[in-house]
Amino acid sequence: MIKIKAKDVDVFYGKKQALFNISLDIEEKQVTALIGPSGCGKSTFLRCLNRMNDVIDICSVKGEILINDFNINDKSCDVVRLREKIGMVFQKPNPFPKTLYENVSYGPTIHGMAQSKQEMDEIVETSLKKAALWEEVKDRLHEPGTGLSGGQQQRLCIARAISVRPEVILMDEPCSALDPIATAQIEELIDELKKEHTIIIVTHSMAQAARVSQNTGFFHLGQLIEHGSTDKIFKNPDNKKTQDYITGRFG
Amino acid sequence: MNLILFIFIVLLGFTSYYFGRKKAYTIQSTKKRLTALPQFYGYYLAIWCAIPAFIIFSLWAIFEPTIVKLLILSDYSNQGYLDDELNLIYEKTKALSRGQFTGEITPFIDASAEKYLSLRSIAQSSKVVIVLSAIIASVAYAYKRISSNSRTREPVEKFLNAVLFTASLAAILTTVGIVFSLIFQTIDFFKVIPLFDFVFGTHWYPAKAFVRDSSEALDPTMYSDTFGAVPIFAGTFFIAFIAMCVAIPIGLMSGIYLAEYASAKVRQYAKPLIEILAGIPTVVYGFFAALTVGPFLKELGTSMGLEVSAESALAAGGVMGIMIIPFISSLSDDVITSVPQSLRDGSYAMGATKSETIKRVIFPAALPGIVGSILLGVSRAIGETMIVVMASGLAANLTLNPLESTSTITAQIVVILIGDQAFGDPKTQAAFALGMSLFLVTLCLNIVALRVVKKYREKYE
């Protein structure tokens, strides 16, 4: 089933065009990997999906992005509700300088999702459990989130993102700042999360894309060169550029 | 003469730099590897030119006057003069030699003046000779060393290190000196006025001390109830409080606006404009407060049936607050801007609005820095002088009514030290005691502010 449908998306930074005519369908409850060399626009595309590009003054987005058949670029779209449905995890772990508990309860608080302290405790606990962090931190929920290791911080950010039960989770190179062990933990987690969430992950590591994703899109110079099932893209790509990139001939 | 010599030495320095470098090139042309870049050879030679000149100049400045004085006064040594009289004779001699003596010229003094002049000219020419020969000797030594391609980089770096060290030492020593002079004068003051009376006395009236005839013996009892500092401490904190009531909300909100809401274009113009406020001399704020705000408040108050003094704490504090706005707004703008963008992104991505993000993430993260900027603002408010002197009056009333006039520590120091001052007089020393208290208060505030700011920095580094 198609969860997100992007139609002819163009993105401009000032006068410079960063994305050209991107059309891409994203399957529900699967992992879609976006790969491509640096500066190819894959992160820009990812940020279109929860309208994070609004934050950048000079950035403008054209085209349609349908999520559950609703165009999020439409004026009637409520960005706050949209971002509640579409969570995001960033390249560098960015826990707030607050306690672990406050980090996870941040989203539920601003969206008024818990009526009582008890409900909030439950949300925090299940989110941390889903992020495979609960066992490590359950005794120090009221210590600062910035005191964790890099991998733990990133899992905390994932817990924060899933605390509001988003339908989609966007991950922007979530493992690029982590060591191999922490990376393996996050990848395992992604596998687990896809049971309940649609996941789109931007990654530089082709091995990672091959390991975690079911679908892959290859971006180059602001264009979506090819997309399809990960198997096909990696074993039998249609496009020469894709093949060159996959086999490491450029990028 | 000294100036010409100095210029000549500087020229010598440049010349030796030039020759040092040239020598290096010569060495290089013989295919030998230099021990440092050619410039270092030049610097090395120039330093060897400057150091002996500097040492001899300073020694001369220290010893020449003493030696000349000894030689002059040796003519008078067996005539039974007192030290004071000898000093007077020496001063007369110097004045006469400069042609500025107006008294009666005795043959003795005339002869001494002649001797003084000849001694000075001997000293001058021997100085030239000694300095120049020292420079030649040391430069020759250094030139020999660089000719044999010895190391030059390390000595030059060491020299630079020493120069920079001396500069910072001078800065520290001056500060320490000022603090010590404050401390000693303050101790003297408290020998006459009990500490208890100063800290807890509620009556400040230093004018009483003005009427004392300096020939009378010092009578401590006459100062009781004169130097009670409570009213001026209270006034100081009260006016600072009024100022911060104006400066904190406005400064903080404009800082948040500039950092988070303003578009790049608005920011580009608004930020320098606000910072211009910080460049206005406080004296201008002072007469703005005294001539515009004060009378305006008085009229406004009268029309509402309130009694407002033309010189009121409100006028001074309010204008002082306006003066402090740019500090708080600019500093808090800086700390808010330096909160990493990733935290904003994280919050927006959770669906938080701008105001929620500011309130829940950015403000707490920037809070230590903001507190630091506020404390720096407070210490400025407490140390501000001109506005208070001009707009709040000089009478030290103990009041908490912002419509009355009151006075501050700084304003009282001005009152005490305007006009003639007698050293060792409690009135003058009172200024030191006040200065000391002011120093202690602002020191504590600055230490706390710096601590807080430092703690904030550690969080992200």
Image: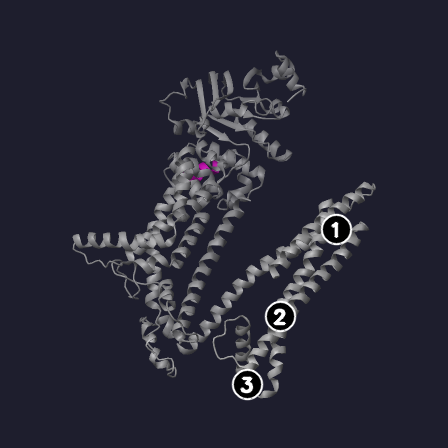
Q: Are marks 1 and 2 on the same chain?
A: yes
Could you tell me which chain the residue with mark 2 belongs to?
B
Toward which corner of the image does residue B75 lie, by quadrant? bottom right
Q: Of the residues under marks 3 and 2, which one precedes in the sequence?
A: 3
Looking at the image, is mark 1 or mark 3 nearer the viewer? 3
Confirm whether residue B271 shows in the render.
yes
- Residue A121 drawn in magenta: yes
Tell me residue B144's x, y (percent): 80, 54
Instruction: Residue under label 1, please give it.
Output: B152
Q: Is residue B214 above or below residue A28?
A: below
The main secondary structure of the magenta stretch is: helix
Percent of width and height locating residue A145: 51, 42
Above/below status of A184 relative to B23: above
The amino acid on which the numbered mark 3 sits, given as a three-letter code, is Leu
Amino acid on which disc 1 is placed: Thr
| Magenta segment boundaries in residue numbering | A117-126
Name the residue located 46 percent from the left edge and 43 percent from the top edge: B334
Closest to the observer: B65 or A145?
B65
Q: What amino acid is found at the position of numbered circle 2 in the picture?
A: Arg
Q: Chain of mark 3?
A: B
Distance from the alpha carbon under mark 1 to that under mark 2: 39 Å
Q: Determine which of the numbered discs, if any, sits on residue B82 in the image.
A: 3
Label 1 crowd (10 A; few <14 / some 14-19 / many >=20):
many
**Label 1 secondary element:** loop
Quadrant assignment, res B125:
bottom right
Observer-nearest residue: B221 or A208? B221
Distance from the alpha carbon under mark 3 to that under mark 2: 25 Å
B151 to the left or right of B435: right
SS for callout 2: helix
A120 or B63, which lies in front?
A: B63
| Residue B120, disc | 2
